[in-house]
Image (spheres, rainbow, N blue to C red):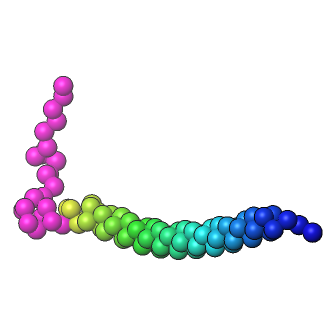
Amino acid sequence: MAAPWMIRILVVLVVMSALAVSYSVHQARRFTDESQRLQQRQTRLESQWSQLLLEHSTWGSYARVERLAREKLGMKLPKTDERVLIRP
């Protein structure tokens, strides 16, 4: 028969092992939750980035810039006889 001190040591080791398993499961769940939140944030940021790129291309389109130059600044394309070529 095993000595009483050996049984006590085994019980302590089993309890410690159970606590360690419980802690590691808790940590795994916490990290999984954090990972999912970060993935959702990444998806939102990628969507926002796509919208900003689309907006950027819309605001900077040549047709829009040319229309604003004509309407708001009164600019126009110069005629051939109005052009001056400057050479270095």
Q: Nearer the viewer, residue 8 or 16?
A: 8
Q: Taken as a whole, is the magenta stretch helix, strand or loop?
A: loop
Q: Residue at x 69, y 71 (%)?
A: 15
Question: Where the C terminus falls, by quadrant?
Answer: top left
Residue 50, quarter of picture: bottom left
Q: Residue at x 60, y 70 (%)?
A: 23
Q: Residue at x 85, y 65 (%)?
A: 3
Q: Is residue 73 above or below residue 34?
A: above
Q: Residue furthest top?
A: 88
Specify whether residue 47 is painted magenta. no
Is 56 left or right of 83, judged from the image as shown? right
Q: Is residue 87 above or below residue 32?
A: above
Q: Nearer the viewer, residue 12 or 53?
A: 12
Residue 49, quarter of picture: bottom left
Query: The magenta stretch spans which residues?
Result: 67-88
Is 15 left or right of 70, judged from the image as shown? right
Is 34 left or right of 24, judged from the image as shown? left
Residue 61: x %, y % from top left: 29, 63
Residue 68: x %, y % from top left: 15, 65
Query: Would you say residue 54 is visible in this rendering?
Result: no
Q: Residue at x 10, y 68 (%)?
A: 71
